[in-house]
Image: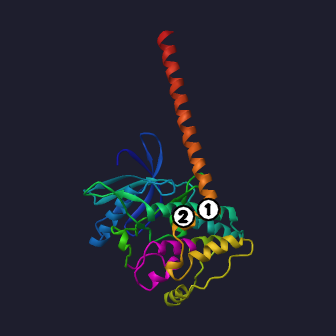
Amino acid sequence: MDGYEALESIGSGSFGLIRKVRRKADGKILARKEIDYRKMSTKEKEQLVAEVNILKDLKHPNIVEFLERVIDREHSFIYILMEYCEGGDLAAVIKRHKERSIPIPEEFVWGIMTQLVLALHECHCGIAKNGDSNELTPRPILHRDLKPDNVFLDAKKNVKLGDFGLSRSLTNPQMAFAQTYVGTPFYMSPELISESVYDVKSDIWSLGCVVFEMCALEPPFLADTQAALSLKIKMGRIQMLPAQYSQELNMVVRAMLQVNPKRRPTTTDLLANPRIKNISVQLELKRKYVKQWTTWTKSLRDYQEWIKFLLSTFS
């Protein structure tokens, strides 16, 4: 990793830490996962490989960008270079508002929710090349651990969905069900709690929990024991959002938190919601404008450099 300058640690986990690094070539700040794989079980190593493969496939403005993987076999470390999100995570935003007893503005809630729907839509409905035939085929990806801690913000408060360590790619979309007990208890769907089969609708439940928490400043289901929490989730009874939030937002959240997964909306359904649709169109226009502006300024710089070259040549 000679091409990077190590900076401060910004997080830690069971097998290593996440560190800020500066790329020496251009000074860009990135995030680097530093994973010691010596103590990992075979299953955990397979999960790590799966995470990297999933990140390599996912290219979307609202998903943390994967840049590079480096294996240091001499010291048994794997380094994963990713986009650095200066704005921190959504959990910190919720915590600040809760400590100050200040509600999160509804406009902000809709904006975060829309970007998360767009990120999940890419996961659930995206396509990828088939390894054998090179044909483009559907490849539903379940995030399986959607929570405020895994929702990151860049310097401009754009959403970046991250931490795909528990994600799973479903290779058979026609039989798109999984059966593994994973995730964070407060955001687990009833089907996960029951250890039964589940699909992309489990991510929709988790999204509903995240949006509810942005409004109520606490998860929709709380309990002192795992058994009590499981019972509350299976019953699926939730309170109305605080009075300052609209009926429209209440309805969207309640739709996502339906106990029966068949009654929950898909990401396609959510993107058809007029409010979400309007915000997603605005986001797309903004991205196009930024892209055009970047292209124009680069062309201008190139033109200025060309003029300087001509002047220096013929002076």
Residues tagged 2 and 1 counted as in contact (Cβ below 8 A):
yes
Residue 41 visible? The answer is no
Nearest the eye: 160 or 139: 139
* Snapshot quadrant of residue 199: bottom left
Question: Is 79 situated left or right of 192 in this image?
Answer: left
Residue occupied by mark 1: 276
Q: Is residue 192 magenta?
A: yes
Residue positioned 60% across, 48% down in the render: 285
Q: Which residues are magenta?
A: 180-208
Residue positioned 49% across, 14% down in the render: 312
* Residue 155 x/y as whole percent: 58, 52
Where 183 sits versus 237, above or below? Answer: above
Q: Earlier in the sequence, mark 2 or mark 1?
A: 2
Q: Secondary structure at mark 1?
A: helix
Residue 222 visible? The answer is yes
Q: Is residue 152 magenta?
A: no
Residue occupied by mark 2: 117
* Residue 90 x/y as whole percent: 58, 64
* Residue 26 x/y as whole percent: 45, 40
Nearest the eye: 28 or 243: 243
Neighbour class for label 1 at 10 Å: few (<14), some, many (≥20)? some
The image's mark for residue 63 is none
Outermost right residue: 244
Q: Amino acid at mark 1?
A: Ile
Question: Is 288 situated left or right of 143 in this image?
Answer: right
Q: Amino acid at mark 2?
A: Val
Question: Is 120 situated left or right of 243 in this image?
Answer: left
Where 271 sits versus 183, above or below? Answer: above
Mark 2 to mark 1 CA distance (whole Å): 9 Å
* Residue 61 x/y as whole percent: 51, 53
Neighbour class for label 2 at 10 Å: few (<14), some, many (≥20)? many
